[in-house]
């Protein structure tokens, strides 16, 4: 398979590039590559402490249920089991990760209290001398459930008669400053549709996707002689982990130390702070080092995936390919709890209507709660699935109008000085140029007028 | 039965930095007496090469060879705050913080050199090999190793600098969505060429052409790796992956790699990539973040190529053989 290093085409934007750089712009070898290849990189699991204990979770076997009772006694009978933790052991059991940037409400318990909202939700943590004993102990815990109807479809979730998934929200959507969705309103959408020659409306859907890191999420917590806790973690964000953990434990931030920096695959899956708080509590209560690492099955079915999204795009266009109006309804399936989804939904709204200058735009982006594993951050979330929808839509409309797919995009492409739908002026645009260069790369014929276009030419409209 | 070929385009943009800002990162830098500059951070290198690019930024700013830079990171007892590695923010935020710290350290480095060489600091330059020298002179110079010793033992000075980057938080207007979400936008156009087997429904991506505009490719080899690795993930998202194959039904969720399908090395398309550079005014040496976006444009490019190949418009991800075959069946019924 031919694989050449990407070439830098310096002909584009030549007058804007600083050609006098010495180190920046050189292909210096990656700092960690040799260690990875030689098997010498140290991951958090390569840290070993005498007396290390292991934590395993007993998880919900129901999608949605009230908890009538929990029997932890059988777990304590397993040889090697040291302690079983329930929500009563968690000083501040309720949290939401983005409380650090002011997101409310705290809608998720570290350990379930009177109900479970998704299959796999943690209920009890078992700490034992060995991993096998912890797993055996967790499997012996008995939970008495009273099943509730489960909600799996985002549009069903938003109907008023549907059962409320997460009582902390009181309805099945995240509230954005009093609104049931994040809105974009730009121009006059109905006027745009009225002026259009044709209307195209299509729906796009994705399913949840796993980050699939080689190294699963985990940590090792070591109680230090001075009473502080040292956390070895594969987190993507050391202070995010430290701050959230300290808040859950109800201790000053400086009682914790996070050591990380080597991650065996992140992709957004390791910013949720799922393992450190409960492992810290276990370390406090046992005064022993604690290791808590997700199994592969937990990583795939319990750790947050990329949200499934449903995106409906309605375009009003002229017969020659100008988009006059674009109306987007977008549903992010957050699952049972917020995690990073309220943020991702706003990011999706900000991304609309794609890199095109459209005079009339209307976006309703809903962050919807359902009874599935909470979704959260994953590489480009809010944008990745939006791009699937937007760029499929562009092709369909171009095809229906009989216009070349690149010409259709070039006609509508944003340029410097254009106003985006979220009312920020475009600067540093280069959409036109990447398309022109791609056309050249695959010898796709473009009319001269489109080859001559530039992102730096204001539309003057 | 036939193998049908098609080509599809997709063009995208992607925002650099945590959406709406408010995501600071700090960097400290100091010279030890070995003349090595240590960058102290709490940032996490996910394998994308953050440590390498920020070392390059520091070397560029200080005017020293890359070998004189060390990165010490990801210990909250010693490293200053970093919001984290996500949202294509690492290179942009941490790079800017490191450049700011290195500028301050460079100024002191030149002052120390000026005193040693008994010249004006404004007349000094770095030669990129480790010497600080008088402009236009080959004799009047001092190596950074000697300089670091002189600073510590003779002049009693630290050669150090502090840096931070913060884009202040933007609050969206609830009614209109007016906001300032990003620091800059990178751009990409992907062309995918696929082959659809109309008997099995299997889609193979044969070739992928990528053109990226990323401000400045601070390290072109690692930028290339991002493009190829991201394209692989895009192919995987498009054709293979989901934890809920019958979404919104929760059944049949995979629990290991024998059930969770992903492409192997042989499924990776042949690739050709071109990088364009339009430096961002607020980027480190013009750099924008491309870490996340490289998985994005491959997905619709493949969807559009499938349509071009066989006339099936895939509306739900992933584009499994079952969906392709059902689409082909529907076309046959419609045409019958």
Image: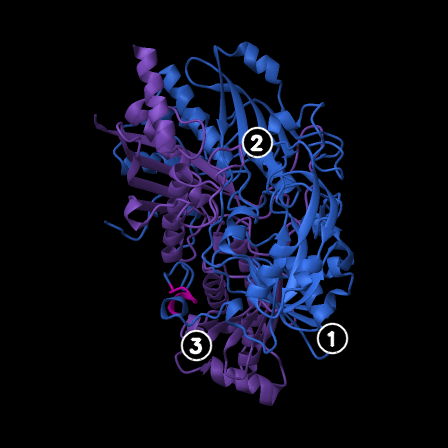
Chain colours: A blue, B purple
Seen from the viewer's position, the closer of residues A187 and A218 is A218
Residue A346 vs A161, above or below: the answer is below
In this rendering, would A255 be left or right of A9?
right
Seen from the viewer's position, the closer of residues A229 and A79 is A79
Q: Quadrant of residue A448?
A: top left
CA distance separating discs 3 and 2:
47 Å
Q: Position of residue B234 (x, y in %)?
A: 41, 42
Which numbered circle lies on residue A227? Answer: 1
Residue carrying label 3: B130
Residue B335 vs A287, above or below: the answer is above
Q: Main secondary structure of the magenta part?
A: loop
Question: Marks 3 and 2: same chain?
Answer: no
The reply to whether the C-beta atoms of the residues labelled 3 and 2 are less than 8 Å apart is no
How many residues crowd mark 3 within 10 Å: few (<14), some (14–19), many (20+)? some
Q: Quadrant of residue A284?
A: bottom right
Q: Position of residue B284 (x, y in %)?
A: 51, 56
CA distance separating discs 1 and 3:
45 Å
Question: Given this view, does label 1 or label 2 mark the residue nearer the observer?
Answer: 1
Please give the range of residues in magenta.
Answer: A28-34
Question: Given this view, does label 3 or label 2 mark the residue nearer the observer?
Answer: 2
Residue carrying label 2: A420
Q: Chain of mark 3?
A: B
Seen from the viewer's position, the closer of residues A366 and B88 is A366
Q: Is residue B42 magenta?
A: no
Residue in the image at 60% along x and 55% along y: A139
């Amino acid at each position: 398979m031919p694989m050449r290093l990407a070439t830098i085409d310096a002909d584009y934007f030549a007058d804007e590039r600083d050609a006098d750089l010495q180190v920046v712009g050189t292909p210096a070898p990656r700092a960690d590559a040799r260690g990875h290849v030689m098997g010498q990189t140290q991951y958090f699991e390569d840290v070993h402490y005498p007396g290390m204990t292991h934590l395993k979770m007993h998880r919900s076997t129901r999608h949605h249920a009230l908890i009538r009772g929990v029997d932890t006694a059988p777990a304590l009978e397993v040889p090697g089991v040291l302690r079983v933790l329930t929500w009563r052991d968690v000083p501040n059991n309720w949290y939401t990760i983005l409380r650090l940037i002011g997101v409310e409400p705290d809608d998720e318990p570290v350990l379930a209290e009177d109900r479970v909202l998704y299959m796999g939700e943690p209920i009890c943590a078992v700490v034992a001398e060995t991993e096998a004993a912890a797993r055996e102990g967790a499997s012996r815990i008995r939970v008495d459930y009273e099943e509730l109807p489960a909600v799996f479809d985002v549009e069903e979730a938003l109907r008023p008669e549907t059962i409320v998934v997460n009582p902390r929200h009181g309805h099945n959507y995240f509230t954005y400053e009093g609104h049931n969705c994040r809105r974009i309103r730009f121009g006059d959408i109905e006027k745009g549709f009225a002026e259009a020659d044709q209307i195209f409306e299509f729906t796009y859907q994705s399913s949840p996707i796993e980050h699939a890191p080689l190294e699963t999420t985990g940590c090792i917590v070591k109680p230090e002689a001075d009473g502080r806790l040292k956390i070895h973690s594969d987190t993507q964000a050391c202070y995010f982990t430290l701050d959230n953990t300290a808040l859950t434990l109800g201790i000053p931030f400086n009682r914790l130390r996070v050591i990380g920096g080597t991650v065996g695959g992140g992709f957004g899956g390791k910013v949720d702070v799922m393992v450190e708080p409960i492992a810290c509590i276990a370390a406090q209560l046992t005064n022993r080092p604690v290791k808590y690492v997700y199994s592969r099955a937990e990583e795939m079915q319990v750790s947050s995936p990329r949200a499934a999204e449903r995106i409906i795009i309605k375009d009003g266009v002229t017969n020659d390919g100008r988009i006059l109006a674009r109306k987007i309804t977008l549903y992010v399936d957050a699952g049972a709890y917020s995690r990073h989804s309220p943020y991702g939904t706003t990011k999706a709204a900000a991304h609309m209507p794609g890199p095109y200058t459209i005079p009339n735009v209307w976006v309703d982006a809903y962050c919807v709660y359902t009874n599935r594993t909470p979704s959260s951050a994953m590489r480009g979330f809010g944008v990745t699935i939006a791009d699937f929808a937007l760029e499929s839509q562009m092709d369909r409309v171009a095809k229906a109008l009989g216009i070349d797919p690149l010409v259709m995009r070039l006609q509508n492409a944003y340029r410097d000085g254009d106003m985006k739908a979220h009312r920020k002026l475009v600067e540093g645009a280069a959409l036109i140029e990447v398309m022109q260069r791609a056309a050249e790369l695959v010898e796709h014929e473009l009319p001269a007028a489109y080859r001559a276009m530039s992102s730096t030419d204001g539309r003057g409209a | 039965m036939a193998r049908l070929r098609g080509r599809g385009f997709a063009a995208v943009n992607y925002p650099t930095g945590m959406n709406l800002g408010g995501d600071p990162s700090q960097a400290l830098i100091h010279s030890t007496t070995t003349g090595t500059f240590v960058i102290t951070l709490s940032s996490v290198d996910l394998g994308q090469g953050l440590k390498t690019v920020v070392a390059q930024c520091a070397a560029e700013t200080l005017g020293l060879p890359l070998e004189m830079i060390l990165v010490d990171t990801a210990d909250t007892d010693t490293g200053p705050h970093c919001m984290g590695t996500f949202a294509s923010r690492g290179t942009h935020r941490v790079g800017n913080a490191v450049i700011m710290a290195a500028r301050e350290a460079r100024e002191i480095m030149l002052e120390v050199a000026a005193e040693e060489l008994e010249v004006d600091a404004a007349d000094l330059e770095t030669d990129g090999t480790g010497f600080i020298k008088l402009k236009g002179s080959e004799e009047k110079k001092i190596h950074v190793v000697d300089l670091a010793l002189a600073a510590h033992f003779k002049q009693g000075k630290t050669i150090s600098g502090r840096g931070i980057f913060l884009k202040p938080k933007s609050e969206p207007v609830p009614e209109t969505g007016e906001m300032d979400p990003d620091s800059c936008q990178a751009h990409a156009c992907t062309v995918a060429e696929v082959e659809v087997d109309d008997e099995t429904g299997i889609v193979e991506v044969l070739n992928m052409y990528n053109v990226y505009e990323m401000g400045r490719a601070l390290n072109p080899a690692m930028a290339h790796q991002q493009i190829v690795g991201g394209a692989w993930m895009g192919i995987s998202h498009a054709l293979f992956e989901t934890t809920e194959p019958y979404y919104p039904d929760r059944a049949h969720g995979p629990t290991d790699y024998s059930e969770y399908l992903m492409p192997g090395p042989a499924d990776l398309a042949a690739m050709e990539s071109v990088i364009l550079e339009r430096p961002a005014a607020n980027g480190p040496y013009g750099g924008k973040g491309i870490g996340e976006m490289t998985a994005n444009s491959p997905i619709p490019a493949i969807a559009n190529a499938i349509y071009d190949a066989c006339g099936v418009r895939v509306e739900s991800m992933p584009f499994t053989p079952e969906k392709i075959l059902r689409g082909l069946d529907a076309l046959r019924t419609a045409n019958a």
